[in-house]
Amino acid sequence: MSRPARPAFALPPWLAHALRTQRGPVPWSAVVRGALAAGPLLLAAVLADRTSLGVVAAIAAMLAGINDRPGSRRVSVNRIGVPALAGAAGLLVGTYAGEHFGAVPLTLLLTGLGLFAGGISAVGSVASGAGTQILVASAIGAGMPLPESGWQRALVYLAGAAWLLGLRLALPTPGSLVGDFRFDGERDAVAAVYDAVADLLDAVGTPHAAARRSALTAALDHAQDALTGPRLRRYASSSAERRLHAQYAAALPLAEAATALAWAGEGVAERASEGPRRLAAAVRGNTHTGPLPAPSRSAPALRALDDALLHAAEAFDRGKGNSDLHTRRRTARDRVRAVFGAGGREYGLRVALSFGASAAIAQALHHAQWYGQHEHWYWLPATAVFLVKPDLGPLVSRVLCRAAGTVLGALLFAGFAAVLPRPEGLIALVALSGALIPVATRHFAAQTAVVTVLVLALVMVGGEPQASASRIGETLLACAIVLVVGHLPMPGQRGGGVRARLGAANRAAHAYLAHVLREAGGGVGDPTQAPRESPVHDVPNGHDPARSDARALRWTLRREAYRALAEARTAIALAAAELPALARHTEGADDVVGTLERLVDTTTACAVHLDDSGRLTAWHTARLTELLEELAEERDRVGLRGPEAPEVPLAG
């Protein structure tokens, strides 16, 4: 008799996350930009005998390089530019405060900035980057001894970030020679949506369907972000851009039909995915689609898929079509709600305590001359800023990675400093580190090691002695501060960030469901009418303005629901990888978001069926009722409030 197999050893989630690394091809264009950013700026300043200004510009370029992530040029303007403006403002405030305030008023000011920056970080990823640079730059301005005035430092800081942003906008990227190189990021993002639709169709009826549907959501989110970046004009101003917008809009009904097929769980013919893959190739090559596979119209979702495929082919061949991106701008009220909501309040308090405590301790050590000859007391609060950011992973994972990365980077720099000539060798080291940042951002420890080498090289070029040992000591002290603050009890319910994301997903899912049920109740069309023909073509041709507007709103609400669910899922995954003392505060949240995902998938299937027949079946209404009851029980268990569930109409 064989013995039962022993369960494989599994690392605890908090440790497994710290060891996890992102994979993917090397972003060579970002590597080139990194090599041309901080190093050349520092070299130009040294040659002009303005080394201190070169250090400030190189720091700005380094922080901009950390924000230089894959995506379209249009998105990079916000992703790099907005944090840079915030950093310049923080540098200005910090410089004048450091010159005119004593230790206690300065600490209070920095604590207040921490509360403000932490609160606005809850608005979104760009706001979070802005909050980070406000705090890092204010600490540098207050603690870095430089001969220049505050306004000079701020202008040079902006110039350093603008230099990298200019490189991002001007230099071509791989594959950008196809069509208009300005829109290479947008083109790749839209093509990825069609590939994701094809992958989902291939996975229909298999255990991989749920993961492929999540991948489709991520692709749609990425494409929507790539196309909705800042613009000088309200609407797309070139034919190439309008064409991309139309191609993205044509993918939405395809995604809807594919989701409905995945919900039904019945396998489809292999050729079903050929059409979306040919459309993806047409987007990447900026060509026509060519022949598409023959239709298969045996079920409502298949009929919707074929109609959507035909509409997409027409949009591609004509080069124009409905270019609505189906997105709504966040209002000022939405942003204020995020800042003062549970997530914003909790995060703001933790950032304020961590940043303020580290600034107070750093100044106490500085005035006690613990630093010896070094004047860089700003390192301790600046390190705490990165450690307290949940964007970079769970708390204990951030601490472990930051400590390991700093020790490795400091030891590497000590070896380099012993053999490299000064300053030319150190400038080359800055350029090399800048080139490595885009690759190192895949793991926080690697990023920390590269940034540590770069910053220590900048400090030494600026005239200060070797500081590897003190850098390690300050990092370990910052880790201890953030660990303590991260586990302190706070006013209100713990897990505010997760609950805020979960609440937003709950509201978005109910708004989407309510809209579809209004269509089922006769708000658009007669639910007793005969099956409709070519429902997708009603939108571009405008035969029924009411139905066209309702469908456009439905796609907008569906996008918002799936995006909110993806953000909630990400927040829950990070919270689950915390130490048990923190992870227990969000237990049950994954059950709620799982039920919400099934509810939104079912709503999508209902919408497709309504387009085809004008009525819901008993199976659809029973499934919706079951999911709403299940959701109500799970929300009660986790204490989540939300809108009242809409009434599901009777079938037929």
Image: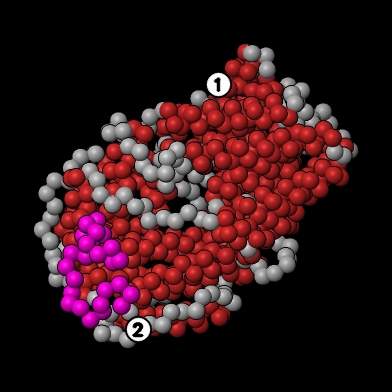
In the displayed structure, does residue 518 sit left or right of residue 268? Answer: right
Q: Which residues are magenta?
A: 522-547
- Is 526 part of what is drawn in magenta? yes
Residue 649 shows which numbered tag?
2
Nearer the observer, 446 or 353: 353
Rendered residue at 55%/21% (across/down): 40
Q: Which residue is mark 1?
A: 40
Residue 555 image position (x, y, % from top left): 35, 62
**For residue 421, above or below residue 229:** above
Residue type pointed to by label 1:
Pro
Residue 94 image position (x, y, % from top left): 75, 37
Nearer the observer, 582 or 258: 258
In the displayed structure, does residue 271 sit left or right of residue 346? Answer: left
Residue 520 image position (x, y, % from top left): 31, 77
Are discs 1 and 2 less than 8 Å apart at CB? no
Q: Secondary structure at mark 2?
A: loop
Per the picture, the main secondary structure of the magenta-coloured stretch is loop
Q: Secondary structure at mark 1?
A: helix
From this viewpoint, is residue 579 visible? no
Residue type pointed to by label 2:
Pro
Rendered residue at 43%/61% (across/down): 560
> Which of the two labelled residues, at mark 1 and mark 2, occupies the earlier sequence position?
1
Q: Quadrant of the C terminus?
A: bottom left
